[in-house]
Image (cartoon, grey):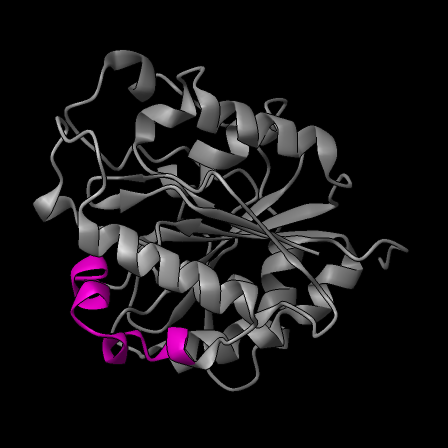
Amino acid sequence: MNTQTTMPVLFLGHGSPMNAIENNAFHQSWAALGKRLPRPRAILVVSAHWETRGIYVTASRQPETIHDFYGFPKPLFDVRYRAPGSPALAQRVKELITTHKVHLDAGRGLDHGCWGVIGPMYPEADIPVVQLSIDTAEPGSYHYTIGKQLAPLREEGVLIVGSGDIVHNLGLFNFHATQPYPWAAQFQTLANHLIATGEHQPLLDYPQLGQAARLAIPTPEHYYPLLYALALQRPDEKVEIFNDTVMASLSMTSLLIG
C-alpha cells in the first residue's frame, strides 16, 4: 500500500463550473498538473460543495456525477466523470480521523467542486476518487485539526485536493468588473503573505483579520478547503502559488504544497 513518493497537496481555486470544460488558462493549468505530479494511487477531495453536519466520506464503488448548479449550457450538464470510488480509502479516512466520528456515505456522488478540477487533471477517469465533506458550523481550527490527521495518506499514494476559493463573495460579484474590488485584492494579498510565511493561525481565525476578510469570506464553505491543504504542509515544505487572479469578488488563487 505504501509508495516511495510523498504525494504533494493541492488547493485549487475552482471558480465557475465552466472552467471544467472551457479551454481557458485555469483548465489548462489543471491539465498540466495532471502531467506534472506523481501519479496518485487515489485522490481525496475536500470540496466546497459538500456541506454536512458532522463528517462524511463517499464510499460508493461507482459514484455518480452530480450537477449541482443551474443556468449553465447543456454541455456542462452532459459531463459524466466516471472515475471509480474507493470504499477502502473511505474506510482509511474514517480510521485516521480519531477526534470525531466519521460517517461513510455509499450513496453520495462527486460534485462539480471535485470533478470540475479533477476531470481536467485526469481526463481518463481511471484513478479512484473519494470526497470528504465540510461541516461549516465548525470553526477553522476544527478543519485544520482534521486535515492534520490525514497526513499519513500522503505516504500511501493519495493526492489530497482542497477545492474552493479563498475570496468568494458571489453576492457582490460583477461579471463586467475589469479589476478586483480593493478589499478582495487586499485580503488575497494578505492571505498569500500568511501562506508564504507559514503563518497559519491567523488564517484559521480569519474573521479577526478585519473587514476585508469578512467581505471575502461571507460564508466559509469555499474557504475551509484551504485549511485542509495548509494543515498538511510539513515544516520544510515550500508552497507554490499559481493562478493568482482575483476577478471582482472571486479569486482563483491556488497552491501546490510539496
Q: Nearer the viewer, residue 160 or 78?
A: 160
For the C terminus, give its image quadrant.
Answer: bottom right
Q: Position of residue 135 (x, y in %)?
A: 32, 69
Q: Position of residue 37 (x, y in %)?
A: 73, 39
Q: Nearer the viewer, residue 109 or 209?
A: 209
At x 87% / y 55%, what residue is drawn? 3
* Residue 215 is one of the magenta-drawn residues: yes
Q: Position of residue 151 (x, y in %)?
A: 67, 70
* Residue 258 is one of the magenta-drawn residues: no
Q: Is 4 drawn above or below residue 172 in the view shown?
A: below
Q: Left or right? Give the position of 192 relative to 183.
A: right
Q: Main secondary structure of the magenta part?
A: helix
Q: Is 237 drawn above or below residue 14 in the view shown?
A: below
Q: Left or right? Give the position of 206 relative to 218.
A: right
| The quarter of the displayed image where residue 232 is located | bottom right
The magenta region covers 202-219
Q: Left or right? Give the position of 10 relative to 107.
A: right
Number of numbered labels in the structure image: 0
